[in-house]
Image: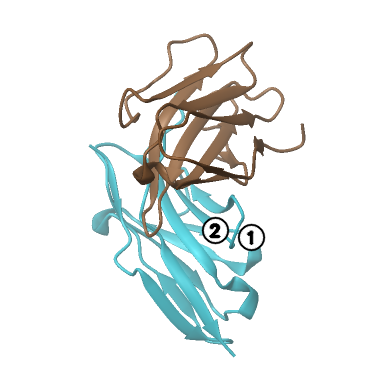
Amino acid sequence: GAGVSQSPSNKVTEKGKDVELRCDPISGHTALYWYRQSLGQGLEFLIYFQGNSAPDKSGLPSDRFSAERTGGSVSTLTIQRTQQEDSAVYLCASSPKGLGSNGYTFGSGTRLTVV
Amino acid sequence: AQSVTQPDIHITVSEGASLELRCNYSYGATPYLFWYVQSPGQGLQLLLKYFSGDTLVQGIKGFEAEFKRSQSSFNLRKPSVHWSDAAEYFCAVGPINTGTASKLTFGTGTRLQVTL
């Protein structure tokens, strides 16, 4: 597609429920990244995928968080047993192999609210 | 480990006034530096980047930034601010493109308010 698409744009869930957040990167971009933006905080790196290489999961805050990328394209970030501290905006970005000449292209994010 | 510091959490300027947003980084090698802007409810948009060469780089919307290696800084400037520049600004650092995926480290952002 023309840009990075994320869905849903907003998600309200009850504490303890599981949620799935979806990211559809720019066609042809081999690298895909997930970041979390909490109120008053910067962007916290979660995970990235590069082609068929093993993902870098070093930023995932707990084992309740996982992500997969199917077919080198769409990615899903799953949060199990959500907690209130998981409330944040989850941003997805993609880039050509490496940072390329323009860094990342970001999606508009999914605002997750855990009540 | 790489890190980015944006010492100003919130800045208010009058429309037409000049602007400088500070960014200091810590990085073990030659960095790849970026400034992004985020308008309310939007994703991040690239303003400008520094890779190599001329240390004064021009970006979109009339913004520029200067890389100063000796000060480990990459401050963002604009000569005359417009009300539409009100947004949050993020500085980021990453490794020079090695052809593999490279994660960016972001600062905590500076929120710019513009008064009329």
CB of mark 2 within 8 Å of CB of mark 1? no
Please tell me if label 2 and label 1 are on a single chain. Answer: yes
Identify residue for label 2.
B37
In this view, the residue in front, A41 or B56, is A41
Q: Is residue B14 left or right of residue B95?
A: right
Residue under the point 52% across and 64% down: B64
The cyan one among the chains is B
Residue A94 position by quadrant: top right
> Image point 48% across, 84% down: which residue?
B13
Mark 1 — residue?
Answer: B60
Crowd class of label 2 (few under 14; some 14 to 19; many from 20; radius 10 Å): many
Q: Is residue A12 visible?
A: yes
Q: CA distance from mark 2 to mark 1?
A: 11 Å
Name the kind of residue labelled 1 in the image: Ile
Q: Amino acid at mark 2?
A: Val
Q: Outermost residue, right direction?
A: A1
Residue drawn where x is 40% and y is 29% of the image? A81
Name the spot of residue B29 as percent of width and height, x first: 28, 36
The x and y percentages for residue A9 are: 64, 44
